[in-house]
Image (cartoon, grey):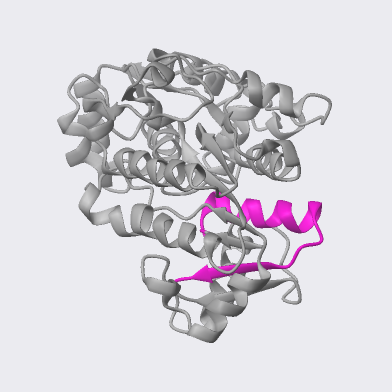
């Protein structure tokens, strides 16, 4: 199979799960100067998130660029892969909400276009496309009801405000068109992918990871309407791979989001219960506190934050305002034993511990609570 985006947070965990659950060989296209450097990037990603080293007999990395024709691979290699690969996991994406659509169009839209062309080359390949719940911010009856189905309506203003969200919406339209033309496609829409449920390891650049780290440094979180569905990355990877192994998943859309919405007040309470006391400050005061701490993980986003005087930053999905139907996802995973851990003190205490910040309760081991 071909897995894209393998050096990212979700991609590394997908690779780890694929190696554990299947006997497949996994081919990866990685931005690098040569194949050796590409393999080194895969190895570094696995090590960064505490995952087992890969068996190079089963995992092969190639230096390339999804945004370029033939992924910038030599013609012979591209043709050979197109003839031998039977499944494609399209996970690659630039996830920065601070970037414009034009900046990330190549990675998220053009890259998807080239992946779909590859999937149709020589032999039809099953495609598992990793998307986001943000595409539900569309002027469409399916989107308004939050259904696990294809969306055709135009994006709302909130969706257009984020280059990332808009690029993922456009990419889904490409996938829908490919499906209508006969390509066997499954769409997996992800919620907020949070840290590993056991180790707490989280993508360092993730907005919520920065919020937690920044809030713990100054002892406060912002009084905002921010809320999200937190889905630990190991459970997300397990769910996606399980769905990949179910032949009946082809042609369907799944919301990998079967967990309640969590807001700032919940997080502040849970952190305090695990020995990481934080208060809640008015938005403007909180931004000033963060700005006064140049080493704060949120400091880099201060210009972005100051635009959101109401406390709504465009990197946080306003899940509290969305209907999100997960019935198909729930039914598909019924009896598999794969569920999301309930958000609460144990999970968020583990995330705080993973950030390496001191706790008022050193005897508390949040990691043993789940």
- Between 270 and 64, the residue placed more toward the observer is 64
Q: How many marks?
A: 0
Considering the image in quadrants, where does the C terminus appear?
A: top right
The residue sitting at 64% across, 51% down in the picture is 14
The residue sitting at 27% across, 35% down in the picture is 290
- Residue at the limit of the structure toward the front, as seen here: 181
The residue sitting at 65% across, 26% down in the picture is 329
Quadrant hosting residue 20: bottom right
Residue 170 seen in render: yes
Task: Report whether 150 appears left or right of 251.
Answer: left
Task: Report whether 180 appears left or right of 135.
Answer: right
Residue 261 at x, y percent in the picture: 51, 17
Residue 356 at x, y percent in the picture: 54, 44
Quadrant hosting residue 114: bottom left
Residue 118 at x, y percent in the picture: 51, 65
Range covered by the magenta-colored residues: 5-31
- Between 43 and 329, the residue placed more toward the observer is 329
Asked if the magenta segment contains residue 336, the reply would be no
Quadrant hosting residue 185: top right
Task: Report whether 240 appears left or right of 325.
Answer: right
Residue 165 at x, y percent in the picture: 33, 38
């Amino acid at each position: 199979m071909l897995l894209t985006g393998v050096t990212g947070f979700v991609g590394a965990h997908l690779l780890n799960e694929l190696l554990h659950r299947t006997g497949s060989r996994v081919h990866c296209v990685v931005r690098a100067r040569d194949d050796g450097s590409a393999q080194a990037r895969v190895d570094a990603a696995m090590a960064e998130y505490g995952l087992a080293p890969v068996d190079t007999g089963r995992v092969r990395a190639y230096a390339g660029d999804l945004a370029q024709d033939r992924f910038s691979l030599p013609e012979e290699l591209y043709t050979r892969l197109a003839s031998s690969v039977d499944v494609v996991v399209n996970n690659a994406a630039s996830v920065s909400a601070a970037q414009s659509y034009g900046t990330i169009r190549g990675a998220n839209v053009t890259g998807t276009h080239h992946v779909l062309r590859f999937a149709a080359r020589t032999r039809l390949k099953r495609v598992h496309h990793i998307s986001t719940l943000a595409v539900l911010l569309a002027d469409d009856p399916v989107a308004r009801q939050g259904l696990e189905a294809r969306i055709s309506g135009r994006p709302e203003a909130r969706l257009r405000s984020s280059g990332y969200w808009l690029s993922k919406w456009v990419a889904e339209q490409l996938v829908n068109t490919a499906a209508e033309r006969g390509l066997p496609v499954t769409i997996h829409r992800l919620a907020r992918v949070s840290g590993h449920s056991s180790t707490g390891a989280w993508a360092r650049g993730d907005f919520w990871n920065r919020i937690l780290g920044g809030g713990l440094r100054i002892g406060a979180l912002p009084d905002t309407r921010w809320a999200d569905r937190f889905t630990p990355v190991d459970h997300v990877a397990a769910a996606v791979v399980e769905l990949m192994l179910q032949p009946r998943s082809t042609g369907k859309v799944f919301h990998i989001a079967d967990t309640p919405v969590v807001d700032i007040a919940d997080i502040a309470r849970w952190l305090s219960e695990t020995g990481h006391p934080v208060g809640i400050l008015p938005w403007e005061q909180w931004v000033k506190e963060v700005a006064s701490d140049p080493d704060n993980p949120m400091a880099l986003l201060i210009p972005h934050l100051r635009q959101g005087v109401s406390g709504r930053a465009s990197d946080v999905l306003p899940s509290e305002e969305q209907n999100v139907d997960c019935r198909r996802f729930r039914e598909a995973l019924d009896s598999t034993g794969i569920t999301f851990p309930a958000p609460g003190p144990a999970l968020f205490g583990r995330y705080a511990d993973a950030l390496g910040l001191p706790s008022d309760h050193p005897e508390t081991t949040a990691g043993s609570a789940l």
